[in-house]
Amino acid sequence: MKKNIIANFKMNKTADEVKAFLIELIPAVKSANATVFVCPNFVALKSAEELAKNSPIIIGAQNISEFTSGSHTGEISPEMLSSVGVSTVIIGHSERRKQNKETDAGINKKILNALKNRFKIVFCFGETKIEKERNATEKVLKSQIETALSGLYENELKSIIFAYEPVWAIGTGENASIKQIEVAAGVIKKIIKELFSEKAANECEIVYGGSVSSQNAKKIFQINGISGALVGSASLDVSEFIKIINLA
Ligand code: PGA
């Protein structure tokens, strides 16, 4: 299976900087053995999509509203994203959970709205340091996944990339160990099996995120049950990001 390598630029890079990044990235991914996603800020999406349209790179957004339209200042609707050719979105990132008070129930509404509008979803979840120290990882993942995927049909899971992102590993330089990631992938598959079926568990795509770099990507890509990475800081530098893609 081709690996999914997803760049999450967060609140970095202007539209022009995203364009410059893509101009370097596009020729480098022509022969890549990976599906490459680039998720810049909203105002960069249109020009990024125009540039990437005839390349294998998929442009994604970092958020989507649970609503269709109306009085939701600062939010963005599925229709608005679709109008610039974007049909992939990151939902449930831990920074939005923390800084924007997003809840599992709210994330569920966003996922349902995105699916209704035929989006591909990069669904992020993961335990905090305290939860890890309390050995509560499995319980936390179960409740996050169960609530966020509530009301979904099994056949909709093919539109979801599960991004396991332990909060303590994001932006800290402290990536989870190979063992921890492997165990988590097993736990995620077990949860999906319980909620849906064994087939769904076998087929689901799980990526890891949290301090992925060209130094650790190779080992991460070899982990049983892991089909790629969500890359934050290390995606901002195009040559570093290309190195990671080439390790897939
Ligand atoms: P990081 O971010 O690679 O900088 O740890 C990952 C993410 O937040 O998606």
Image (tube, grey):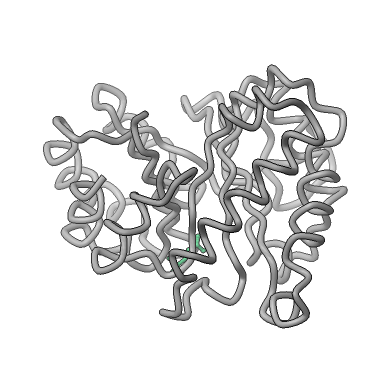
Residue 197, compared with residue 216, is above or below; it is: above
Q: Residue furthest top?
A: 155
**87 or 196: nearer the viewer:** 196
Q: Quadrant of residue 218?
A: bottom left
Count the labels in the image.
Answer: 0
Q: In x, y percent, where is residue 181? A: 52, 60
Q: In the image, is 229 to the left or to the right of 68?
A: left
Residue 22: image location, x then y, percent: 24, 44
Percent position of residue 62, x then y: 56, 49
Viewer-nearest residue: 237 or 158 = 158
**Residue at image coords 12%, 37%:** 27
* Quadrant placement of the N terminus: top left
Residue in the picture at 61% in, 71% down? 167
Q: Is 140 on the left-hand or right-hand side of 36? A: right
Q: In which quarter of the image is the C terminus?
A: top left
Residue at point 46% right, 70% down?
Answer: 177
On the rendered structure, is 170 left or right of 148?
left
Residue 137, how many percent across, how many down? 72, 66
Check the image and report above or below for 39 versus 178.
above
- In this image, 184 relative to 39: left or right? right
Q: Quadrant of residue 32?
A: top left
Q: Nearer the viewer, residue 8 or 74?
A: 8
Q: Where 30 sits versus 173, above or below?
A: above
